[in-house]
Image (spheres, helix red, strand yellow):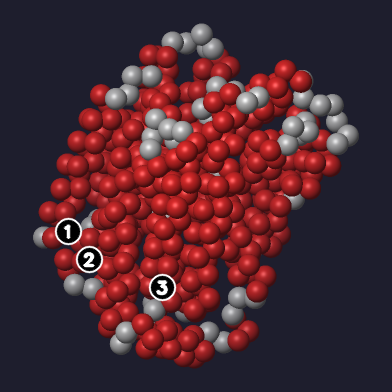
Amino acid sequence: MYSLVMLLAFLVVMVSVGVWGMKKTSTLGDFFLGGRTLGPWLSAFAYGTTYFSAVIFIGFAGNQGWNMGLNAIWIGVGNALFGALGAWLVLGKRTRRMTQRLDVMTMPEFLEARYGSDHLKMIAAVLIFVFLLPYSASVFKGLGHLFESTFGISYDFALLVLVGITGLYLILGGYFAVTLTDFIQGFIMIVGAVSMLVILVSKAGGLQSALQAVAQGYEEHVPQGRRPSLLTMGSLIFMTSFGTWGLPQMVQKFYAIKDELMIRRAAVITTVFALIIGVCAYGTGMLGHVFLDLDSVPRLASGAVNYDLIVPTLLTTHLPEALMALIMLLVLSASMSTLASMILVSSSAITIDLYKGYLHPEVSDKTSLLMIRILSGVFILCSWAISRMQIGFIVTLMSLSWGVLSGAFMAPYILGIFWKGVTKAGAYAGFFAGAGTAVTLFFVLGAPRSPLASSIAMLVPFIVVPAVSLVTPKVDSSVIDRAFSD
């Protein structure tokens, strides 16, 4: 009963926000970037809620909490310091300035304008579409299964709720609606995350007793030979922290903030949000060692530990019904905010970068706005259809997405906003080196070592781009002057 009432209230609020956002959205820039008028709180929560989807609360927290014990908390700390604070302070001001100078709205448009390359924009747009659409489908799929197993809601009905709510407020209100709903969802995430950790710690006998029990349980449950190495833990923290620096749906948040003076405030707000969510999520995951043992821990048919069910098992067993309803909204909010950002960026890759950028440059802003709304709906429906088909390789593609997209975009983007010497050939070389390394190492090292593969893929282009740029023709001086002018 609690779940149904809170879900209906949540639905009404989200639709109302979408209608409000529609009244403020009259141009393509309004729909995709909110007219670059957003303040620090909305921008910070938009970044934070896009950063953390339901994956961190369920599968990721359960997996790392069980396998890393107390060390899992360092992932949350690293995400807050490097993925949130570092990203805003290092990239925020430069990114906003240069994207305004070049008059661009998307990552592919930025690469085209910064390096004077039409083909790089087209390749980047296709890469975003190929990896973000199935990625969003995998989030739908995982969330549908979670609602089915944890809350007793059928898989198909859960998908329809997700598609309906996300589609309504995104298509109607665009980025205005996405950021305001992110703000609301962010507070739901904070209250839900803190509540579940506090209750579980209390049931474990308090903070000190809980930490001691986690350490003792970890020694008993995870043999020495199966514990992750320092290299594995380091690559996991690196991938989840610095990987956001190159993801198009994350970088977009820097484009839209109202002015540079707000960047430091947004950085602090995002860091506090990330620290709360990260510590609560991984703290809950590692408490599996307190409430579960080798006999009661969820397992797959093969006998291996089912990490995806560790946190749901803790929550359904030890939390009251009313709080479980709040946790349902927490998981829903975390996923919908991430999905909305990915779908918005995917639809922009077709509308802004390919259709308006190549096929019909003369298309009116009104027509482009209508098209991006339609395509957002189409992508949501495609994600829903793929989710219902239960295609196995989607999960594999999701694992690849982070490494491929960050590997391809990070070096050409970051070096491009700081160094005038990056050439078009250098950007191309870094783009293909990052994406190629991510795909190759994923299959060579295997899915369990995908954090290491992704981390290497992010680092390799930072060697390739400068090396190629030093021996290839420079970008036209007029392009450089425009990009770096005061």
| Residue lying at 33% horizontally and 52% vertically, measured from the top left | 186
Task: Report if residue 50 is visible in the image.
Answer: no
Q: Where is residue 478 in the image (x, y as percent from the top left)?
A: 72, 18
Question: At 70% across and 46% down in the image, what residue appears?
Answer: 434
Per the model, the C-alpha gap separating discs 2 and 1 is: 8 Å
Secondary element under disc 2, as helix, strand or loop, is helix
Q: 10 Å neighbourhood of mark 3: few (<14), some, or many (≥20)?
A: many
Say whether residue 431 is left or right of residue 264: right
Disc 2 and disc 1 in contact, CB within 8 angstroms: yes
Numbered mark located on residue 259 in the image: none
> Marks 2 and 3, Cα distance to the nearest angstrom?
18 Å
The alpha-carbon separation of the residues under discs 3 and 1 comes to: 25 Å
Residue 359, position as x, y percentages in the image? 55, 14
Judge left or right: residue 406 versus residue 176: right
From the viewer's perspective, is the residue at label 3 or at label 1 nearer? 3
* Residue 129 versus residue 8 in the image, above or below: above
Count every numbered label the image shows and give the total: 3
* Circle 2 crowding by C-alpha within 10 Å: few under 14, some 14–19, many from 20: many
For badge 1, the amino acid type reads: Ser
Look at discs 2 and 3 and give the one toward the viewer. Answer: 3
Per the image, label 1 sits on a secondary structure element best described as helix
Looking at the rendered structure, the kind of residue marked 2 is Met
Q: Name the residue under label 1.
A: 3
Tell me the SS state at disc 3. Answer: helix
Q: Mark 3 points at which residue?
A: 283
N-term-proximal mark, 2 vs 1: 1
Residue at screen point 33% across, 69% down = 312
**Which residue was labeled with disc 2?**
324
- Under mark 3, the amino acid is Gly
Most extreme residue toward the right is 471
Image quarter where the C terminus lies is top right
